[in-house]
Image: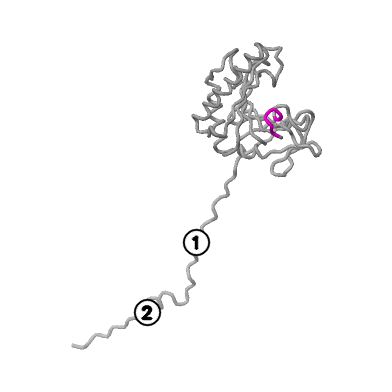
Amino acid sequence: MKPRLTIVLPFIGLLGAGCEPAPVAVPPPPPVAVVEPKLEASLFSRPGPAQVSLDGHPLGQTPRMVKVASLDEVFRITAVRGQKQPAETRIRIISDSAMEVTFMFGGSVSPMAKALGLPRILVFDYGSALTFNVDKYDLAPPFTTMLNHQADLLTSHFAGIPIFVCGHTDLTGTSNHNAILAFMRAEVVTDYLVRKGVDKKLIKTQGFGSAYPVAGNDTPEGRALNRRTEIILPR
């Protein structure tokens, strides 16, 4: 029997001779995430108009409505009138998606800032949502809902910053009674914020009676706005 002759040829040589390498598929780059504006901020200034900007980029002149992506951007909005900075900035929360920011110029130091011994202040003003019934200091359900948001803001955006919780009343009642009532209103808000995780060591609780109204006391609506507790931070 004759031996069999087996010829083995390189497999690569047979298949690869004269062929171009197959192109490597390159995946497309991931899409760029576009951050849509989530909040509407209505910007005001008193007295008179002011120039506003966000991180140094001009936004125009007050009054003006701008759309921003987050609360962080709201806190970075600044205002100037000539060379002057506002002595007081008031943020009124309207809803989860809307707020009003008012820059108060007036004198070099606002009356409330002077009372607290601060050069400039940031005031969280919840308007009628954080009002109290006449001669009462208990928290109504709309009040606690807003305070939940406030506690989140203080722990996430202003950690470690001193917090002034300031109670106020309308003009009805004696000065002594209003001073005690204002402090009780501030104290009940402080206790609620602490239960929601705000560091009690950072909070100073004060009552100012009817000394610092934000509206006239000659109408029920104005008196309701004055029966309030404000959360104030150094600016």
Q: Quadrant location of residue 101?
A: top right
Which amino acid type corresponds to the residue marked 1 in the rendered image? Ala
Q: Earlier in the sequence, mark 2 or mark 1?
A: 2
Asked if residue 3 is positioned above or below residue 168 in the image, the reply reads: below
At 55% from the left edge and 55% from the top edge, which residue is drawn?
29
Element under disc 2: loop
Range covered by the magenta-colored residues: 113-118
Residue 25 is labelled as: 1
Q: Is residue 117 magenta?
A: yes
Q: Nearer the viewer, residue 46 or 159?
A: 159
How far across and how far down the image is residue 80, in percent?
77, 37
Q: Looking at the image, which residue sits at the far bottom? A: 2
Label 2: how many Cα within 10 Å (few below 14, some 14–19, many 20+): few
At 64% from the left edge and 26% from the top edge, which residue is drawn?
125
Residue 10 is labelled as: 2
Asked if residue 214 is positioned above or below residue 24 in the image, the reply reads: above
Q: Nearer the viewer, residue 170 or 17?
A: 170
At 60% from the left edge and 17% from the top edge, which residue is drawn?
180
Q: Is residue 168 left or right of residue 10?
A: right
Separation of residues labelled 2 and 1 (CA atoms): 28 Å
Q: Coloring scheme of the render? A: one colour
Quadrant including the N terminus: bottom left
Which amino acid type corresponds to the residue marked 2 in the rendered image? Pro
How far across and how far down the image is residue 35, in percent?
59, 43
Q: Is residue 208 magenta?
A: no
Q: Is residue 6 left or right of residue 98?
A: left
